[in-house]
């Protein structure tokens, strides 16, 4: 499978470039400052330095030429040199990108060989879906779950507009996959609080289709975020938030509380996840029980419903009682649904 070599190598073989300084590095880099990327706009990076500390500040930076093609995305931990004061007009230089703990990727569509990194170092993907207006689309949710599990991230399914329809069906569909579910409605501030508890101390990426209430939710969580809500002008789209790149927003600290309240990354440009880069085995790792059972599968088993001698079917059949069998069946059917979503069109 074709990949963006540069990014792939950095992620899976960090030892090649390593964190040890390379010989051609200039001595000034020894006193580089650590920072996190919170926004990217046409080659200019917004960073936060001393996150949660006494000298916390936002600075602007560009990439040092020596970084070459290495892509830098929101969530990246980087080292910067130069003017890191954050004063008006100051500009620092990013000289290193630290190894990533997670990489949320997508391909533009399922036949596109080029994958893009959406966000680095995030813990959880929050899939915002309206219970009605617009109708929920399980194909889209499935693809988000696959992308998250492939990245090694947890999934929180946030079901909005609970005043319009019941969440029960979707809950039953996603809880067996290990997905946590929260239900919200605009007129119930306690529901936003529950979402906030799930976001505490973590970096979460929010995705959702237009109109699902994502901006409404973000504004409730991050009061100074000012994400544009509602349709302003159908023809020109003017008056809407026009940014299409990801941006990290800090959750406000609770009074007297945490040093780090967590980050939410809004991704206005991401409407769906192409999954051409996802490998079955990586997806399987997100399901511990299935992963273990699949050790008995024939070599090269696809684990699909029509795969001959797939040990996952034996695992269901070998259940000690009806209840266990029912639970295992739901797990396997759900997993196979996700497998299928890699090639389904939405
Ligand atoms: N009935 C109901 N409507 C809601 C709820 N939350 C948001 N809405 C409405 O749904 C519409 C879309 O909300 P937004 O927050 O703008 O949705 P969005 O997902 O950010 O969509 P874009 O702005 O197009 O990206 C608005 O008219 C909101 O007022 C809710 O809990 N119940
Ligand atoms: Zn199998």
Image (cartoon, rainbow, N blue to C red):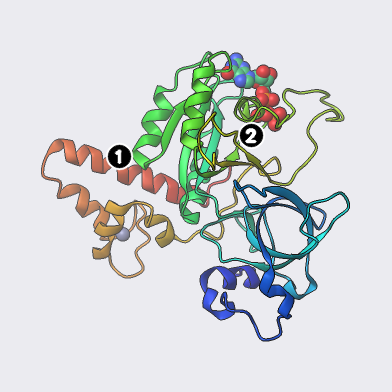
Q: Nearer the viewer, residue 107 or 228?
A: 228
Q: Is residue 176 left or right of residue 32?
A: left
Which residue, given by chain and number where applicable, does mark 1 sit on?
330
The residue mark sitting in front, 2 or 1, is 2
Q: Is residue 158 visible?
A: no
Label 1 Cα neighbours within 10 Å, binned few <14 / some 14-19 / many ≥20 = some
Q: Marks 2/1: CA distance? A: 27 Å
Q: Quadrant of residue 259?
A: top right
Which residue, given by chain and number where applicable, does mark 2 sit on?
209
Above or below, comparing residue 135 to residue 40 in the picture:
above
Q: Residue at x 65, y 62 (%)?
A: 78
Q: Secondary structure at mark 2?
A: loop
Above or below, comparing residue 302 to residue 126 in the picture:
below
Q: Quadrant of the C terminus?
A: top right
Q: Residue at x 34, y 38 (%)?
A: 176
Q: Quadrant of residue 83?
A: bottom right
Q: Position of residue 296 (x, y in %)?
A: 23, 64
Exactly how many numbered labels are in the figure?
2
Above or below, comparing residue 295 to residue 321 in the picture:
below
| 2 or 1: tag closer to the N-terminus | 2
Q: Quadrant of the N terminus?
A: bottom right
Quarter containing ligand 1?
top right
Task: State yes or no: Cβ of the residue under disc 2 lies below 8 Å from any atom of ligand 1.
Answer: yes
Q: Residue at x 78, y 58 (%)?
A: 61
């Amino acid at each position: 499978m074709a990949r963006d070599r540069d990014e792939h190598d950095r992620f899976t073989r960090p030892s090649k470039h390593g964190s040890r300084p390379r010989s051609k590095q200039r001595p000034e880099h020894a006193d580089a400052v650590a920072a996190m990327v919170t926004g990217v706009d046409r080659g200019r990076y917004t960073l936060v330095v001393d996150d949660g500390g006494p000298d916390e500040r936002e600075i602007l930076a560009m990439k040092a030429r020596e970084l070459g093609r290495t892509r830098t995305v929101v969530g990246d931990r980087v080292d910067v040199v130069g003017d890191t004061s954050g004063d008006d007009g100051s500009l620092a230089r990013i000289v290193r990108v630290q190894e990533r703990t997670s990489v949320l990727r997508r391909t533009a569509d399922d036949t596109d060989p080029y994958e893009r990194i959406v966000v680095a170092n995030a813990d959880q993907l929050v899939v915002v879906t309206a219970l009605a207006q617009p109708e929920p689309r399980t194909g889209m949710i499935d693809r988000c779950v696959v992308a998250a599990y492939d990245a090694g991230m947890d999934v929180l399914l946030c079901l909005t507009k609970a005043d319009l329809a019941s969440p029960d069906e979707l809950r039953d569909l996603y809880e067996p996959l290990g997905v946590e579910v929260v239900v919200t409605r605009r007129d119930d501030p306690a529901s936003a609080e529950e979402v906030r508890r799930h976001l505490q101390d973590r970096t979460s990426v929010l995705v959702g289709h237009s109109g699902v209430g994502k901006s409404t939710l973000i504004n409730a969580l991050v009061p100074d975020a000012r994400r544009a809500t509602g349709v302003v002008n159908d023809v020109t789209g003017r008056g809407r938030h026009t940014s299409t790149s990801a941006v990290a927003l800090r959750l406000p600290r609770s009074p007297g509380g945490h040093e780090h309240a967590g980050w939410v990354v809004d991704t206005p440009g991401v409407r769906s996840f192409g999954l051409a880069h996802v490998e079955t085995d990586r997806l399987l790792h997100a399901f511990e029980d299935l992963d273990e059972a699949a050790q008995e599968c024939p070599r090269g088993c696809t684990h699909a419903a029509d795969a001959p001698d797939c040990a996952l079917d034996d695992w269901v059949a070998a259940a000690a009682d009806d209840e266990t069998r029912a639970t295992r069946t739901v797990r396997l059917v759900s997993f196979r649904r996700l497998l299928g979503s890699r090639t389904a069109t939405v």
